[in-house]
Image: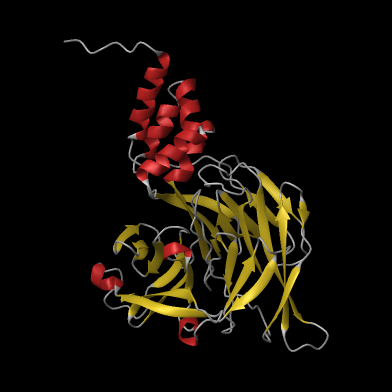
Amino acid sequence: MAPPVVRELWEMEELVEKILLSIPPEEPEILVRASLACKPWCRLLSGNAFRSRYLALHGTAPVLGFLQSWVAGDLERFVPTKKFCPRSPIPKLKSTFVHDCRHGRVLLGCLQQRDEAVVWDPVSGRRTELREPDYFCAAAVLCSVDGCDHAACNSGPFSVACIEDEGCVDDDEHSLLLASVYSSYTQKWTSPACIHIGFVSDDCFMGRPSLLIGKQLYFLLDHGLGILRYDLSRHRLSVIDLPEKLVEHNPLLISGPGGRLGVVHQDKHGLCVVYSRWSIDGEYRWLYSRAIDLNMLRPIVHPMSSHPPVLAGSLEGTDLSIVVTDLGVFTFDRKSLSLRSFRVRSTDMVGFSSAHLSLHELQHHTRYVYLDTSYMIPMCTIV
């Protein structure tokens, strides 16, 4: 018996969408080729509705590759982990480095002009230059639309939060930190919020990834000063104490169950996960969850190596962390306890996806930004 005839055009479009939604994220090049078949398919694939459904169906997208830069050079090449390679132009800015990346945008800084920063949208290649404040030692970029699911907001309004270190002012023994927010909608900076912290003779930030949970931004402070919390809704700064034994092992901020603030670090016992709990006396309490020996899950460290794994970054809103060893780069799922390797070697990573991104800066020479399939789908319009 012959199959029934599709009578309406919308029925055919619905069938096409179902077929395209079933394409696995591990084969993104198929979506790109499908976008070239005809204009209706291109419009469908590049639409926000399709992208949201695709992400909802497939969940966390696999990593497509890395954008590599050198500390003393430019953001210069894409290192693919799969066949797909984006063609979005990379900004040729002298001595560029990555400050932060989130919600489909990358915040770039310039080593030679510390007051200059650029917000870059890799999908469209659009760049927005920022000239104020005069100097900032920590920064974060984020979508500024309330209630956004961040599935396809890279072309919408954004905000940039910058933290300035004024040092000791008027013979005060405590360093002064100032925080301001730039809005792409108003193209203006807010008046600064300020807080005094302990005496610091040099940079007071660890250079680890910032973390966004709701309307709260978190930055790891150096010298055992704890965690700087920036309440974006109230425009207020505060400091959260961090146990000294956590600070010693170069920790990484993560989001835990129920939106709790968490910390993960690598010590001699393995990968330790710690979550915060707000006590009735108004103080943070830290509860140890577990210690995980990554090498027992899968050999990721050379048997003759004396260097332990290094935590390089994570994807906000997921259980994925990035681990770097002398054998390569791995993603670790803290929930499923699974490891996945990539053919890339580095000691400095910047996690990148359209929905969840994070920053890491170590003492060595390279940086990477990694792209995932959820970020790739709008690129169909520019391929």
Residue 69: image location, x then y, percent? 55, 58
- State the residue at coordinates (72%, 82%): 175
Residue 374 is drawn in which quadrant? top left
Above/below status of 61 relative to 230: above
134 and 238: which one is in front? Answer: 238
- State the residue at coordinates (76%, 48%): 186
Residue 372: image location, x then y, percent? 44, 48
248 and 254: which one is in front? Answer: 254
The answer to whether residue 94 is visible is no
Left or right, 160 with respect to 214, comes to right
Residue 223 is drawn in which quadrant? bottom right
Above/below status of 101 relative to 194: above
- State the residue at coordinates (45%, 24%): 41
Left or right, 97 with respect to 322, comes to right
Residue 229: image location, x then y, percent? 61, 71
Find the residue positioned furthest to the front.
280
- State the residue at coordinates (50%, 50%): 355
Above/below status of 49 relative to 141: above
254 and 31: which one is in front? Answer: 254
The answer to whether residue 316 is visible is yes
Count of marks, rendered view: 0
Residue 362: image location, x then y, percent? 52, 71
Find the residue positioned furthest to the left.
1
Find the residue positioned furthest to the right.
170
The N terminus: image quadrant:
top left
Residue 164 is drawn in which quadrant? bottom right
